[in-house]
Image (spheres, helix red, strand yellow):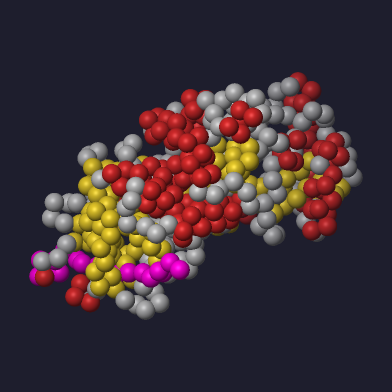
Amino acid sequence: MKKTAAFLMICAAALAAVIGCATSSGSGGENLKNARTVETDIVIVGGGGTGLSAALAAAEQGKKVILLEKMGYLGGATAMSAGKVPAAGTKQQAALGIEDSPTALAIDILRPGDWSQRIDLVNLVADNAKEYIEWSEKQGVQWELETNLLYNGQSAYRMHVSKDAGAGLVKALSDAVNASPNITVMLNTPGTGLISNAKGEVTGVSATDNRTKENLRINAKAVILATSGFAANREMVEKYTPSIANAYPLVAPGATGEGILWGLGLGAGVRNMSSYQGYAPISFESKKGLGQSILNAGGIMVNSDGWRFTDEFAGYSNLAATIVNQKGAFAYMLWDDNIAAAQRNLVNQWEKDGILIKANSIQEMAGALSVNSSRLLKEIDLLNAGITKGMDYLDRVMLPKQSYKPPYYAVKVTGDFRHTQGGLTIDLSTRVLKDDNTVIPGLYAGGGVTEGFSSTGGPGYMSGNGLLQALVLGKIAGQQAAAY
């Protein structure tokens, strides 16, 4: 059975001058004399998809790895995900005759961000996505190509879904980690800082075992930050991603941003800190996701004043921020009988759940929603005119196929916030870079703690970006740290 322990050690600069120890970037206060020292080749902070992939990749090179996880379980944000990764040129695509390429994938990722992202980083991940799918299958992950939905922004069917979603992905990777004699997993073990020497080289991590309260110093040849983003850090969310701060937080509790803060303490650069993934629509009452089917079929959004306020087909992350910044942080998803007939199972389920509102006229619907009747009537008239002309006044590309007709249906909705997509600047070897683009020796990073490739805000996020970033960069970080 794997050893599961943890560590904490903080050596402030003033203390270093007194007792001659290395400095630590992070919270501090404990005397190094009370810390037990542990030696390893590589220490990884964070046991989600990034950390698990990094540990396996480094262990394959014969390196001894310590994997720290602050929670009492592995998985992080990856376990909460849908387990979907876009990859191009895979055997799953070939079996169905689907032609695709890493270049096409990279272009699709760059387009929503208006090509403002790091093109070299996007190309790196797109080029290595197929190889990750193949490599992870050897670790026990089972992937299936999703062909029942072409995701918004994707030019080909390329979304690969792990068996049993994110939980299944984490289980497969965790089983492989626990089977490796080169990897020691330490749960309930938050890292508390980075240890560096006088040359500025990162030489280890301080940590604490929350069960025994033992302080530990882990010396390593290389350190990998896999601590995820800062979605669970309210102060950082309000500072960097205020547009989504009103959303319901459906975030990994361990994503508290410490890895980014440690890097900043060593002079690291950061990028795309305003980037995030939100999701809408979700039920205002239950906070359960409602999916995109109604909107894709032609459903619209109206606010508490009865006005439409956005292109409903602009993407679920952008839609989340738009909804939560309406008065009351909610909206009504509204559709007609044509759409209901095509989505009868959903409609019946929502009626059973007690969240469905039905009306025989727009006036009746306005009364049920407590919105201005004349405004709502005007919106439906404008929508129907746009359907007839093939041109929506809010520039919605995908319009309903038929004009709206009674009866009408609605659900009160809001948006949630799932993870951040900005962080430490890295090079193509996943080495953390300073503000001046020089390398911080010995420090690597991957996943949500690093700069993402969804540009800024929420509109640049495309389905699968977060998990693609986490898994592929995690594997590369493990390989590169092993070679350091």
State the image quarter where residue 88 is shown: top right
- Magenta region includes residue 112: no
Q: Position of residue 21 (x, y in %)?
A: 14, 65
- Which image quadrant: the C terminus? top left
Q: Nearer the viewer, residue 181 or 74?
A: 181
Position above or below: 191 against 61: below
Is any part of residue 471 visible from this angle?
A: yes
Residue at 44% over, 49% down: 53
The outermost residue toward the bottom is 212
Range of residues picked out in magenta: 1-18
- Which image quadrant: the N terminus? bottom left
Residue at 39% over, 53% down: 55
Q: Position of residue 376 (x, y in %)?
A: 76, 41
Q: Position of residue 338 (x, y in %)?
A: 85, 36
**Is residue 432 left or right of 473 when viewed as pictured?**
left
Q: Nearer the viewer, residue 172 or 165?
A: 172
State the image quarter where residue 322 is shown: top right
Residue at 19% over, 66% down: 12
The outermost residue toward the top is 389
**Is residue 108 left or right of 218 when viewed as pictured?**
right
Residue at 83% over, 38% down: 342
- Magenta region includes residue 17: yes
Position above or below: 227 against 117: below
Position above or below: 221 against 29: above
Q: Main secondary structure of the magenta part?
A: loop
Q: Position of residue 206 (x, y in %)?
A: 28, 65
Q: Nearer the viewer, residue 10 or 220?
A: 220
